[in-house]
Amino acid sequence: MKKDNTITVIEPSRGWFHIDWSEFWKYRELFVFMVWRDIAVKYKQTLFGISWALIGPLLSTVVFTLIFGNLAKLPSDGLPAPLFYMAGLVVWRYFSTALTKCSTSLVGNQALLTKIYVPRLIIPISSCINQIVDFMIGLAMLVILMLWFGKWPSAYSALIPVVLLLSLITALGWGLLFGALNVRFRDVGQILPLLLQLWMYVTVIFPFSRLPDRWGDWRYLYGLNPMVGAVEGMRWCMMAPYMNETKDVSKTIDFAQVPGYVEAGRRVTMKFVDGEAVWKVVEQVASPVGPPWILLGVGALSAVLMLIIGLGYFKKVESQFADIV
Amino acid sequence: MSNDIAIHVENLGKRYRLGMTVDLKRDFRDTIKALPRMFRRSIAEKQNGEDYFWALRDINFEVKRGEAIGIIGRNGAGKSTLLKILSRITTPTEGRAEIHGRVGSLLEVGTGFNPELSGKENIYLNGSILGMTKREIDAKFDEIVDFAGTEKFLDTPLKRYSSGMRVRLGFSVAAHLEPEILIVDEVLSVGDTEFQKKCMGKMHNIATGGRTIFFVSHNLASIERLCERVMLLDQGNLITQGDPTAVIEEYRRNGEKRKSEIVWDDPKSAPGNDIARLKAVRAYDDKGQVRSEYKVNEDLYLELEFWSLSGDVRLDSGFYLYTDSGELLLSAMDLQNEKWRHKPRPQGLHKTRCLIPKNLLTEGGLSVSAFVVTAHKEMHLFERDVVELNIIDHFDEGSARGDYKHKWPHCAVRPLLQWEFEYNGKAI
């Protein structure tokens, strides 16, 4: 028998931020097993197995392309609509499944709360990690789709891990909060799908470049939703050279100049402002899209703040899990 | 602290808030329901004072390295709470405990088993949940499989296993965990008799092999065989500890001492008011013998005697039955009787008795509170926990169990229901 000098002290809970990091190291193998278990179980006894990880993003890409690209004709930063949406959806789907799994992980593993002691944080964290497999599959699918459109992944794709990390932290922050709340209030299970649906529409569809210029730096508040940074970051990392944003640089002209422009084949518009006709010649320039550093930065701040809140709440109520789950 | 201490416990206590386990919807519903009561003085008001109860309080003890300790006590005595605190599943409300050495706790067999995974995969998963490293599992793998006797099914998903096989596999993994301190709850009461014997043998090896064992069971015989020292818990307090035979003897006596009868002789000092006072409350069986332990399928009578003092007031009497965990199981009141329902009770001693039919209650402790009221108007007396009963499970036929001999899930009631069957051999 091994001699072991560990001393375990059991005391009333110490609340908010008492995290025993060395314990995580001790339980690292369990962590690996938990991640492996969820991956192994996910596609067991399914006919199409791992290909479900492809079917999901492909199907939503088709739907988004048809509805938002072809019907609504929303701008897509100069990219073919399928690439634009798929890049966003791959990262979004990672986030939304990770958040969902994370939020339901504690309730779904009740025996691990009530019958044994394991560091509780392992449960939600491992459920966020294992979704990375699906993310990788989605990413591979995206690359194939890009090649099909004749576009090579840009060198910036080495930065994909940053995007993934941002999504992971966001999912974890919100997931810890929701997961801990879910132990007490099962309403979380009802609210989450609604929330995620709304969240998706404000994240995946509308490119940042289309926010009106006159909002100035206020536009970056959009980045408080960290997934905006992640989605924009994903598109930029993979396809930066092919992206451009069109800016409206129409200028006002005198009435006398109108025939000249029209003859030159330019589009001219007229609007009444205070009862006077104002003529403009339409001009749009396409400029390359720059890296979304600011969005990523704002997103990271917001994600880390949420992680602190989530972790704090989780640790605060953790000691009651076994009693109330 | 000296080096040969394995567990040191100081002033340990755990308080639960009543109703903490219920969901928000029920909280909400109860609040709404409670609203009208706030305007009406009623019996319920009296019992609402206690929102908290101590599942465990002022527990102090020490366990030396290599000792085998048994914990006994009735349902709700705090045994499981103590194990859960020592296993770090839940935190104490006060006090502290120190554990020296690696702890393995076994409150359930096969925790974390996943039905989709194969037997082999589950051994690794369950082992790591119990705190074994992959290397340890590798090294013990053959022994584990051998002990469980499931070699042939290693690659079969666990969901195809029989429940017996699952239990065997689960116990086998746990039995090969080699902690210095092993905390075991009633897990040996599972599986068939032969396997139980095998488990007891294994436990015995562990106990004599110099490891510390902390063992909870209802099975007094196995406690006596396995343990060097026994602790008796009652209502969250550590009543006594010491030599197994002596403590078990005391526990048995204690069980009989559960109050099956309470009597007040003097009508002046008995609980109550100028209108009614309580004389006695007792429980007895169909032969009239007063006792506190009843089998699930035995009739049980509750009797209440009270003095009517003024003689011109209508009086109704009844009981509340609480489970050991403090929940109100039922409320019974003599409202159906024709004799006194709408008439004042003349001065003198009145006796009411009520039959609680067999095959209604389920196993566990019950405490009886008695009251005498004038319904809708006034409460004259309400005495909490005057009689305490123990309903015991057993394996004679004539109960909901039939000839089923395994663990019955914990329910609020265990009625004997009528079953009807139809069969049509041609319907395939």
Image (tube, helix red, strand yellow):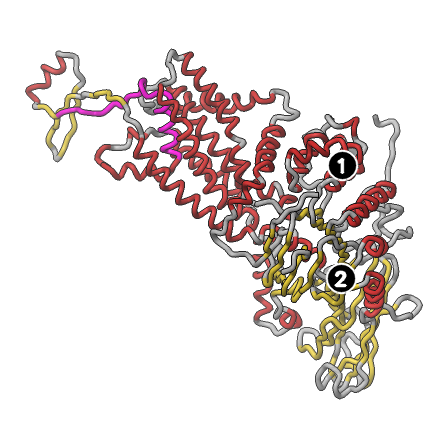
Numbered circle sitting on residue B231: 2
Which secondary structure dominates the residues rendered in magenta? Answer: helix
| Residue A241 drawn in magenta | yes
Q: Residue at x 91, y 70 (%)?
A: B289
Given residues B32 and A271, the one toward you in this image is B32
| Residue B256 drawn in magenta | no
Label 2 packing within 10 angstroms: few (<14), some (14-19), many (20+): many
x and y, in percent, of residue B270 in the image: 75, 83
Instruction: Using residue B199 as the reference point, say whether residue A4 is left or right of it.
Output: left
Given residues A65 and A106, the one toward you in this image is A106
* Position of the N terminus of chain B by quadrant: bottom right
Say above or below: B173 vs B211.
above
Q: CA distance from mark 2 to mark 1?
A: 30 Å
Given residues B57 and A29, the one toward you in this image is A29
Q: Which residues are magenta?
A: A227-251
Given residues A210 and A324, the one toward you in this image is A324
Q: Quadrant of residue B365?
A: bottom right
* Position of the C terminus of chain B by quadrant: top right
Q: Chain of mark 1?
A: B
Q: Quadrant of residue B20?
A: bottom right
Label 1 packing within 10 angstroms: few (<14), some (14-19), many (20+): many
x and y, in percent, of residue A47 in the image: 63, 21
Residue indicated by mark 1 = B169
Amino acid type at image mark 2: Met
Amino acid type at image mark 1: Leu
